[in-house]
Image: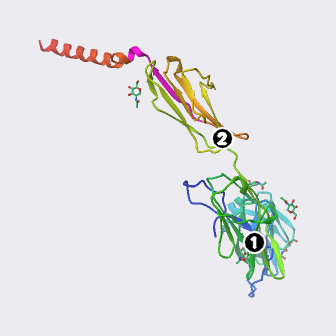
């Protein structure tokens, strides 16, 4: 089974799946041997819901119960304990305050979060201080995800323990129209959407059915990230000479459907007649450059709901004079060189 987690951006890691739980048709069958077992009710918990870890086949004559996180009985992992005779509940270091222990040993989690996924161990002790333990698993799946258009893909999985059923997918309460960006597994249990478009945002459900019955999963909400990717600037030359050179600055962006504006030293760029913007404003040409054009340039991409601004690109403008001769640094260096030669000659003579 895939681990539930938010989708990663492509290229940064493996594409991860999102899970959708549909477990309402499930009929839990008790094991035939009277073994101590833990059952998660429901078996596939969605974040924000309540889950009960039910204990089955407890023997009589019990004195107390204690629940622990993980697979070991260890005080540092204690959540809560209950003494039957005195009906006293004691919370341990791992208690979040959302757990309730019942007189029958079952543990209720209120408003489970993804972090509650894991193993839980019950220690039951009888009145002769004989104890037995059992470990069960709690899985919590996300109820929603925020994805980026064009960049992310999602895999929605319909989880069910039922056999002999068919699965169909619902989007915004309607039967999902399968487009060429979508793929269903052979049994319809997984739905892949790749690439994602803005119109894919909304509520998804899966419905499991057989000829006599049907049941829908909880809603899984897919949200689109409205934020824009940060643009960057490329310059034809970041060190130019006044009056002589021209420079072309290009705003690089992968965002679609955006407008661009330019900033100079954190202010809106004032367009001089030496400056020219391309029609989509993605390139700025300054021809010729002047001393006063030196400074930080940024481009900002924006749409009606969001905007993002590039890191500043620093443009250095050299004066014409420096360009004509050696640079200052070079001249000082050669003077020192001459002096050193002179000093050496003096000591030999
Ligand atoms: C234990 O008690 C809780 C609360 O009354 C109940 O919901 C649950 O079904 C019980 N568990 C078992 C195994 O009987
Ligand atoms: C959406 O999911 C995130 C994490 O998966 C969670 O923190 C948040 O509360 C959820 N929002 C709603 C409205 O369920
Ligand atoms: C899968 O879903 C399609 C409609 O989306 C349906 O025609 C088909 O019978 C389903 N297959 C199974 C195995 O459920
Ligand atoms: C979907 O249907 C449910 C009831 O069946 C209703 O409460 C909900 O508002 C509907 N959602 C949309 C988006 O139509
Ligand atoms: C950038 O400008 C400097 C100064 O005018 C010039 O020497 C250099 O050749 C230019 N570099 C490029 C790649 O155009």
Q: Nearer the viewer, residue 93 or 220?
A: 220
SS for callout 2: loop
**For residue 239, what is the image quadrant?**
top left
Q: Nearer the viewer, residue 110 or 190?
A: 190
Residue drawn at x 57%, y 34% as measured from the top left: 311
Task: Point out residue 235 in the picture as x, y percentages from the top left corner.
Answer: 49, 32
Q: Is mark 1 within 8 Å of ligand 3?
A: yes
Which residue matches tag 1?
Answer: 168
Q: Is residue 183 visible from the viewing direction of this image?
A: yes
Can you tell which quarter of the image residue 100 is in?
A: bottom right
> Which contiguous range is marked in magenta?
310-322
Asked if residue 120 can be seen in this view, the reply is no
Tag count: 2
For the N terminus, the quadrant is bottom right
Crowding at mark 2 (Cα within 10 Å: few <14, some 14-19, many 20+): some
Colour style of the rendered protein structure:
rainbow
Q: Residue furthest front?
A: 279
Q: Residue at x 55, y 54 (%)?
A: 12
Using the numbered discs, state the Cα–Cα distance from disc 1 to disc 2 in whole angstroms: 37 Å
Q: Is residue 239 above or below residue 221?
A: above
Say which element carries label 1: strand
The label number, if any, that marks residue 258 in the structure image: 2
């Amino acid at each position: 089974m895939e681990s539930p987690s938010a989708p990663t951006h492509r290229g940064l890691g493996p594409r991860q799946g999102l899970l959708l739980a549909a477990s309402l048709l499930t009929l839990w069958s008790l094991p035939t041997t009277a073994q101590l077992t833990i059952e998660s009710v429901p078996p596939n918990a969605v974040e924000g819901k309540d889950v009960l870890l039910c204990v089955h086949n407890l023997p009589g004559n019990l004195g107390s119960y204690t629940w622990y996180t993980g697979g070991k009985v260890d005080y540092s992992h204690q959540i809560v304990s209950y003494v039957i005779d005195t009906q006293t509940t004691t919370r341990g270091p791992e208690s979040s305050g959302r757990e309730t222990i019942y007189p029958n040993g079952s543990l209720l989690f209120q408003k489970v979060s993804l972090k509650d996924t894991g193993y839980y161990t019950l220690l039951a002790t009888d009145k002769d201080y004989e104890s037995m333990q059992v470990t069960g698993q709690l899985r919590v799946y996300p109820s929603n995800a925020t994805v980026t258009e064009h960049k992310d893909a999602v895999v929605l999985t319909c989880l069910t323990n039922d056999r002999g059923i068919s699965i169909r997918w619902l989007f915004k309460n309607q039967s999902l129209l399968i487009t060429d960006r979508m793929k269903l597994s052979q049994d319809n249990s997984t739905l892949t959407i790749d690439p994602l478009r803005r119109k894919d945002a909304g509520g998804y459900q899966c419905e499991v059915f057989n000829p006599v019955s049907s049941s829908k999963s909880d809603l899984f909400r897919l949200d689109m990230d409205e934020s824009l990717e940060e643009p960057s600037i490329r310059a034809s030359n970041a060190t130019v000479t006044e009056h002589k050179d021209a420079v072309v600055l290009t705003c690089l962006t992968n965002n679609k459907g955006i407008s661009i504006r330019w900033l100079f030293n954190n202010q809106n760029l004032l367009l001089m007649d030496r400056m020219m913007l391309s029609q989509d404003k993605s390139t700025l040409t300054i021809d010729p450059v002047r001393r006063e054009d030196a400074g930080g340039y940024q481009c900002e991409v924006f749409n009606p709901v969001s905007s993002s601004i590039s890191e500043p690109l620093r443009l250095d403008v050299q004066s014409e004079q420096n360009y004509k001769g050696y640079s200052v640094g070079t001249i000082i260096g050669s003077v020192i060189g001459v002096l050193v030669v002179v000093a050496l000659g003096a000591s030999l003579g």
